[in-house]
Image: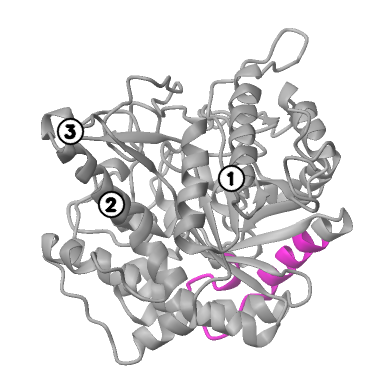
Amino acid sequence: MGRFPEGFLWGGATAANQCEGGYREGGKGLSISDICTGGSRTQAKRITPVLEEGTFYPSHEAIDMYHHYKNDIAMFAQMGFKVYRFSIAWTRIFPKGDESEPNEAGLLFYESVIDECLKHNIEPLVTISHYELPYHLSKEYGGWANRKLIDFFMNYCTAIFNRYKGKVKYWLTFNEINGAMGNLGNFLSLGIINEGTTDFMHQVDNPQKRFQGLHHQFVASAKAVQLAHELDANNQVGNMIIYATTYPLTCKPEDAIAAQKQNQNFNYYCTDVQVKGKYPTFAQRIWDENGVSLDIAEGDMETIANGTVDFISFSYYMSSCTSADPAKKGEGNLLGGTPNPYLEASEWGWQIDPQGLRYALIDLYDRYRVPLMVVENGLGALDTIEEDGSINDDYRIDYLRKHIDAMAEAIADGVDLRAFTPWGCIDLVSASTGEMAKRYGFIYVEKYDDGSGDFSRRKKKSFDWYKEVIASNGENV
């Protein structure tokens, strides 16, 4: 018996706002990602409600997958993809978000993308909302803090569930929904721009709006699950979280409690609601400590209880340590925490911890007992084109190999793992920094942070390596 089950779904993952471009084509509206400027490791991307002439906005062109998707999907097929996780841009279907009728050009575009996948025997895994709320809903309604967005979201779900019935059976409601547990989630996850916020990394926080917005997303997700099941019994709907493995910095009991609390707040709060159908026991303390008083409408908790997800999908990039000592707060890791002295870090300061993925899989499966999918994992790095045109990304191969081995160990531990879709299987714009230089893909795209590049594609060394991994069902890594 092999390390991975027969029928395991190997593939890759992207997001519309980070790869499509064509930001005004086919009737597409303006999304919150379209008002973010480029950034870098040292310079935060800015949020500009009014687009500035002469300023570079990476999502406007991205890697122009809008015009290259047939070739890109053919390259995924060459690698042997069984599944392709991508997102639908809400603004292509409802440009402003609050229209009553969908945009036919947007529906046709994704129908063509889905058909292209099916032509190559690639299963579409579709994220419904991936960090690209229509900007109109942010500006006019205040983002997800406004309960009206539940109905707008359901109108959107109804359009795509009906249109792609029988073609798409795997759906994810909100990408990394627990990103809203932190400051960056105000804008990124919820489309809330609090007064005084000018750049992405230094957002003014409003916990009351943030937790209320999350509650509205929980209700919307549950309604979407119920609708998907009603329309097609074959539909499987998952949630999607960032899983941040957290260790106590020392064996000091206070550090262990701090790590436990961090796990509850970040890894369990949202997942308990979406999988168990109710808020966890520790939720009240989180609300009290943040000065939050949730407005829970009549019927909300019943809706949440009746709309639990079929599986859990998650991103895993790094782990961190937690200390009860405020002086031990660290830098680098996207999710904060204290650096682990036993781990190396990427060029962007993200600590590399394959064992943390095994830990995550065991933890999630033991707690929830539903199937799991790892739908984001990978190494963002600076790639160099050699004189002969080759890109020797052995560092990426090494990173993925160790994480695949960790998944195999978790499966041997009894975890029901169904899929692995490494992030940015083709180079795309970074969500956190808004740059192209931080590359993840098996496929290199000639597009650069000064806006130059002809969008040509070329295979990296990791392309053929991953092809062999898939062909051997994870035996040859």
What residue is rendered at 67% in x and 60% in y?
A: 125
Dots 3, 2 in contact, CB < 8 A: no
Q: Nearer the viewer, residue 434 or 164?
A: 164
Image x and y of residue 259, in percent: 26, 43
What residue is rendered at 73% in x and 40% in y?
A: 3
Q: Which residues are magenta?
A: 92-115
**Residue 252: image tag:** 3
Q: Nearer the viewer, residue 69 or 158?
A: 158
Horizontal side of residue 212 vs 432, given as left or right: left
Cα separation, mark 3 vs mark 2, equals: 26 Å
Residue 353: within the magenta?
no
Ranked by sequence position, the earlier of labels 3 and 1 is 3
Image x and y of residue 108, in percent: 74, 69
What residue would you read off at disc 2? 182
The residue carrying pointer 2 sits among few (fewer than 14), some (14 to 19) or many (20 or more) residues within 10 Å by Cα, namely some
Outermost right residue: 119
Residue 96: within the magenta?
yes
Image x and y of residue 151, in percent: 44, 84
The mark lying in front, picked from 1 and 2, is 1
Ranked by sequence position, the earlier of labels 1 and 2 is 2
Q: Nearer the viewer, residue 454 or 412?
A: 412
What residue is rendered at 44% in x and 50% in y?
A: 242
Whether residue 395 appears in this view of the structure is yes
Report the quarter where the C terminus lies.
Answer: top right
The residue carrying pointer 3 sits among few (fewer than 14), some (14 to 19) or many (20 or more) residues within 10 Å by Cα, namely few
Q: Secondary structure at mark 2?
A: loop
Q: Secondary structure at mark 3?
A: loop
Q: Nearer the viewer, residue 390 or 97?
A: 390
Horizontal side of residue 160 vs 330, given as left or right: right
Does 172 appear above or below 334? below
**Residue 413: image tag:** 1
